[in-house]
Amino acid sequence: MSLRFALKLPKEHGAWAMLYVPFVLGVAVAGRVNWQVLLLLLSATAVFISRESLLVYCRARARGRDATEAGRTLLLYLALAAAFGSPLIFACNLFLLIPLGLVGAALLLINGKQATRMEERSTTGEIMAIGGLTMTAPAAYYAASGRWDVTAFWLWLLSALYMASSVFYIKLRVYRLNPRKQAEQRQALRSCAFYHSFLIVALLALIFAAGWGLFVFIAFAPALLRTFWGMVRPKTKMNLTRAGILEIVYSMIFLVCAALNFHAT
């Protein structure tokens, strides 16, 4: 039995980046690391891992199967999340973590319901999941700095916009691997083109409204270039290892440049 299976760890490698890259960004912009950050990291990780057990539990219940083990594992991880997170509320008075946690819990439950209908892989389902995962950016900023200001919102928005890019790009790449799914390919191409066109307009508007510099565009540039290049030069093969490594590199560029943007303004 593998360690991943024993601990019921999520299978999606990209989801880990969607959780931790925004978290590190929030800490980097706050400019400090403290024990509140460590507790938040452990609590957020436990909630994230519990998602796998929730999906198993919901699917089993929907199909009339025994879900006792998945339910116990789910409760264990949620109890760990509460144990690590409670001091942040009651000892550190970081009360604004409560609404963030409630929104995250709501998205987790919705995702579980979608899993019973096999809809958690839909674009809507994945975007909702990203909206929840990237809340680690404002949460980490708040825990590290003790401040709740407009920077927290910008951190979440930039993280969510960046991570959503990969959803549309990967779906397009996957559909193009199957020549029989012509209709899905056309729909994926339209969705990918629309989202990334919107992303460019949104970034320009944000730069103008917030008075940011070019660091924001540099942060998104690799993802934008790989997407538009992929749309005009489709590939019939996909090297998952190479694609995964490139996504990590792009995420690191986003992390560094986004953090520099906030320190430069």
Image (cartoon, helix red, strand yellow):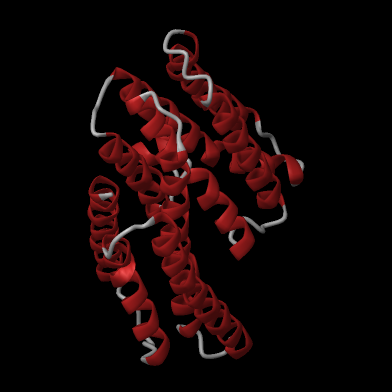
Q: Nearer the viewer, residue 65 or 146?
A: 146
Establish if 178 lies above or below 260.
Answer: below
Q: Which corner quadrant holds the N terminus?
A: top left
In this picture, residue 109 sits left or right of residue 153: right
Q: Position of residue 39 (x, y in %)?
A: 36, 21
Res 240 quadrant in image: bottom left
Q: Nearer the viewer, residue 79 or 40?
A: 40
Q: Position of residue 247 (x, y in %)?
A: 30, 63
Q: Residue at x 31, y 44 (%)?
A: 25
Establish if 257 lies above or below 223.
Answer: above
Which residue sits furthest top? Answer: 91
Q: Position of residue 46 (x, y in %)?
A: 45, 29
Residue 122: tell me if it is visible: no
Q: Nearer the viewer, residue 58 or 13?
A: 13
Residue 74: tell me if it is visible: yes
Q: Residue at x 48, y 65 (%)?
A: 167
Establish if 171 lies above or below 61.
Answer: below
In this picture, residue 8 sits left or right of residue 123: left
Q: Position of residue 124 (x, y in %)?
A: 63, 61
In this picture, residue 33 sits left or right of residue 4: left
Res 231 quadrant in image: bottom left
Establish if 137 lies above or below 188.
Answer: above
Q: Residue at x 30, y 53 (%)?
A: 258
Res 165 quadrant in image: bottom left
In this picture, residue 199 sits left or right of residue 99: left
Question: How many numbered marks appear?
Answer: 0
